[in-house]
Amino acid sequence: MPDNLIRKYMNTSILSIEPEKRIREAGEFMLNNNVRSLLVKDQNNYLGIVTKTDFILRVYVNENIDPETEIVAEIMSRPILSLDSDCTMEEARKYMQKNGIGHLGVTENGIITGMLSKDNLTAYFGRLT
């Protein structure tokens, strides 16, 4: 397997939350697990993604959203942007930069099997220098 494929650097532990959970619960779950994104999952389907940026822009900048009463579905981003695990890290970097995202779903046969973040890219490209 080539050394520059996404599959080698992606996170295979996918944390998710239900769309009807309160925003505060999602934030606490992210803090407790030291992650900056969660996939939003309803039964067996991933519906979207909620990130640290979503919290900042959609909750704290927008004063109309109450994290105690509003649900995750209100602030999640959708669709989940993704690339196949056989794509290269350079392709992932370009795709994430083009779309202005910090987290990317990684798929195999159209099914999300992992996540790639800016941190993964930084670690990969940092070791090349």
Image (cartoon, helix red, strand yellow):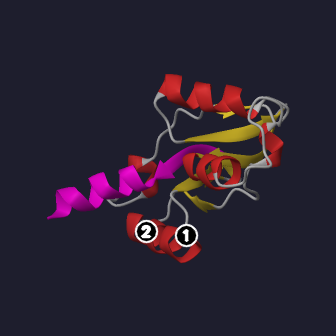
Q: Is residue 23 left or right of residue 94?
A: right
Q: Residue at x 45, y 47 (%)?
A: 10
User: Residue 9's x, y, as percent?
Assistant: 39, 48
Q: From this viewpoint, is residue 1 visible?
A: no
With 63 as the anchor, is 89 left or right in this view? left
In the image, what residue type sits under mark 2?
Arg
Q: Amino acid at mark 1?
A: Gly
Q: Residue at x 54, y 54 (%)?
A: 103
**Mark 1 — residue?**
100
**What range of the chain is rendered magenta?**
112-129
The residue to which callout 2 is attached is: 93
Q: Main secondary structure of the magenta part?
A: helix
> Where is 37 relative to 31, above or below?
below
Residue 116 falls within the magenta-colored stretch:
yes
Q: Are marks 1 and 2 in contact (CB under 8 Å)?
A: no
Name the element at disc 2: helix
Residue 27: image quadrant is top right
- Quarter of the C terminus within the rendering: bottom left
